[in-house]
Image (cartoon, coloured by chain):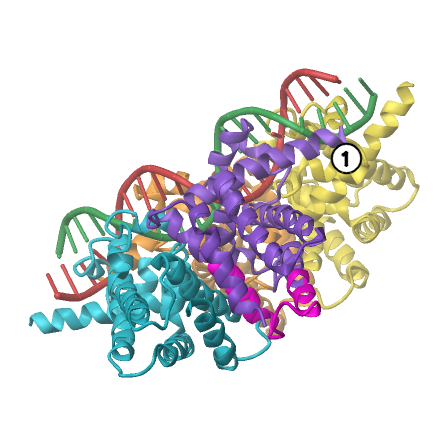
Chain colours: A yellow, B orange, C purple, D cyan, E green, F red
DNA sequence: GATGAATGAGCTTTCATTCAT
DNA sequence: AATGAATGAAAGCTCATTCAT
């Protein structure tokens, strides 16, 4: 019983995620989502008390997903340089295979402050994801690979860079596929952060 | 006479820019803007044929403004390293003094594709700005300071990084002022891009 | 359930028909209609996707209604002369008892081309009605009562004449009631069309 | 001086007539008309105190024009039968050469009661035109060609028929040109009205 | 849990008319 | 006479949310 409800919830999250990422938060209506999940509009509200709440649950869902992927890399016994590359790889892989996730992160979560204002202050809703980047960075520093510096500067570099590239890709501005940039980008990042 | 109309237009652009950046495109209404310019709703449409058109004029206005600032740096007779630092400085300075400009760029222009779809394809509406970054990069390569690589990879690094930092600042996540990061960031960028 | 929705739809059609006929298409607002049906504005759009669509459904509704009345006359086993008179009679009867129908036909449907342009090309939306006039005419020709001539010439005479009279009545120009003209008019029409 | 103003007025009437006939009363704006006359919106109001007043002046202008054409026929020394034909001919000729006039009559004047309600009661604004039809009819009766009957019945036949044909033509429903129907129609009308 | 009709506030846009110049 | 910026009321339509069933 309880599992069934959880399952429905995740179906809604997945469909809403795709629609929000594709059309934007304000251009996606609850009826749109209900249609996609093949559920009545009214019933949607038995699972999420409002559109905003749904949006917040989605970003948490994404954070957990991405955090999990990063954790797997962090747990590997490889050099910081290799980790750096693997993170770039997985980020671009997700951007290719599940573009709605990265898109949601960049275009919905980062850009609609008013929606996430209450309940996602600071990094509450992307906690799992940020934590893994933090671990990557701190371990890199600890083992002497990375230069000690303000974490946020490193975080901004890493995430801003990757996000920027996905943005450019989304605008059809990049002349090549994302994968083609993996070498350049991981090289640049490691070069910037290393001692 | 003709000047007066142009002046009013710029007043609208400035007010709308602030409101859009502060509250988002869909949460800013034409009546909101009209109120801010002390003008009737109907009269707004004598200056801009639609809300979308206004949004597009704003991004062009910003692009010209930022482009001009960057051009001044590009025209200085200084090393690439110094230019890199000056660009970071000016970007953060604008983000502090006219935060609505960078916010508009990041949260309105980059995130509401549907609004800018027609008329701002590719980089049409941010042309002036991008061009200057391109000049910075190509001259850096030419004089042997920067490593030759795909421009977009370099562009993504530079702009993604700076944008990311402003985002973090906007979320009140950064423990220090933006200025405090200038050293780290310009160092990181130059290190990443240099030969 | 399904019947209930259909019923509401017809209530809207009836109320809108009356309002459009009385005040014109552009002077009747959706709020006006909603008020008349005691329904919220928003809910109106659960029944008709736009004001134009509503207008088109109304003309089809009228066409079916009038067509049905004419079919009953066509199916009677009487002379063409008698049929002619009965058609004039029923037309004037409807113009008296349900004046909104004829008014809608003459003043809304015929006069607002732009509204009916898409979806009511040619005679699509008044098909049932025109068909019966065609049957009346062709049978009259076949049995030797009516002169063979271009159908549209006969149609224009019949419908233009009746419409013209209702117009004059509507303008309070006619000195007598419509019924008082039945003899003259059916005589004139039959005289004009007969061999 | 006074002539110049009168001239401008007629230019406005002509342009407005075309626009109203083509796009309808409510879809033609004062700016539209001003543009067509190459005059400022504000100045329009020095010639006509309101859009409604303009519409009324136009119908009077048309009535005078059509009345004049009919008077010429009425003054000819020909049989009623020939007059009937000539009236049909001139009506169709105008419908071909100056379609905006007949269209205005049928689609603007007859269909937008609310606009002409005050100031064009009864037949005030189409007086010249109706008068000539009346003269045609009464002279026809006097000389023994036409059957004595209620004038409005005859008027409705004549005008309803001709208007109906032009309507059908306007809807692209008629398979042939209007001229091709002149024989049939004048025959039908004369047959209907003659003794 | 499930349905979808119902609500109503709110949005963008239009336009006849006015008025300062 | 002439201009066209300015006004502001009102329109069509949307949509998050509620609620009777």
| Residue of label 1 | A63
Q: Residue at x 52, y 81 (%)?
A: D180
Residue C148 among those drawn in magenta: yes
Q: Chain of mark 1?
A: A
For image coordinates 52% across by 55% down, the residue present is C115
The residue sitting at 60% across, 55% down in the picture is C82
Locate the N terminus of chain B by quadrant: bottom left
The answer to which of E8 and C137 lies nearer the viewer is C137
Q: Residue furthest bottom?
A: D77
The percent position of residue B114, horizontal first and vertical second, equals: 60, 53
Task: Please provide percent x and percent y for residue A2.
Answer: 89, 19
Q: Is residue A185 left or right of residue B77?
A: right
Is residue D189 or residue B120 the one in the foreground?
D189
The secondary element bearing badge 1 is classed as helix
Residue A66: in magenta span: no
Neighbour tally class for label 1: few under 14, some 14-19, many 20 plus, Cα within 10 Å: many
**Among the 4 quarters of the image, the one containing residue D109:** bottom left
The stretch of residues the image draws in magenta is C135-161
**Residue B145 left/right relative to D37:** right
The residue lying toward the viewer, choosing from D10 and A119, is: D10
The answer to whether any part of residue C100 appears in the image is yes
Residue D147, picture quadrant: bottom left
Overall secondary structure of the magenta stretch?
A: helix
Res B158 visible: no
- Where residue A46 sits: x, y (%)? 76, 22
Say which of C67 and A152 sits in front: C67
Q: In this rendering, is residue D170 above or below E17?
A: below
Q: Looking at the rendering, in which quadrant would you find the C terminus of chain B?
A: bottom right
Task: Specify the farthest residue to the left.
Answer: D1
Image coordinates of residue D89 in percent, x first then y, are 40, 79
Instruction: Please say if C42 is above or below C173.
Output: above
């Amino acid at each position: 019983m309880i599992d069934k409800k959880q399952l429905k919830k995740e179906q809604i999250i997945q469909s809403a995620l795709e629609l929000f990422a594709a059309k934007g938060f304000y251009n996606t209506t609850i009826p749109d989502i209900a249609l996609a999940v093949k559920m009545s509009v009214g019933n949607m509200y038995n699972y999420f008390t409002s559109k905003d709440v749904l949006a917040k649950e989605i970003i948490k869902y994404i954070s957990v997903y991405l955090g999990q992927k990063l954790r797997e890399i962090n747990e590997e016994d490889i050099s910081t340089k290799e980790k750096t590359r693997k993170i770039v790889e997985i980020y671009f892989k997700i951007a290719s295979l599940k573009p709605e996730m990265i898109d949601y992160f960049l275009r919905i979560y980062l850009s609609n402050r008013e929606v996430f204002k209450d309940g996602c202050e600071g990094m509450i809703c992307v906690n799992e994801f940020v934590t893994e980047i933090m671990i990557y960075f701190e371990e890199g520093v600890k083992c002497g690979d990375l230069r000690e510096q303000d974490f946020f500067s490193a975080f901004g570099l890493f995430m801003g860079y990757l996000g920027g590239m996905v943005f450019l890709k989304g605008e059809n501005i990049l002349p090549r596929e994302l994968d083609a940039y993996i070498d350049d980008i991981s090289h640049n990042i490691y070069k910037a952060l290393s001692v």
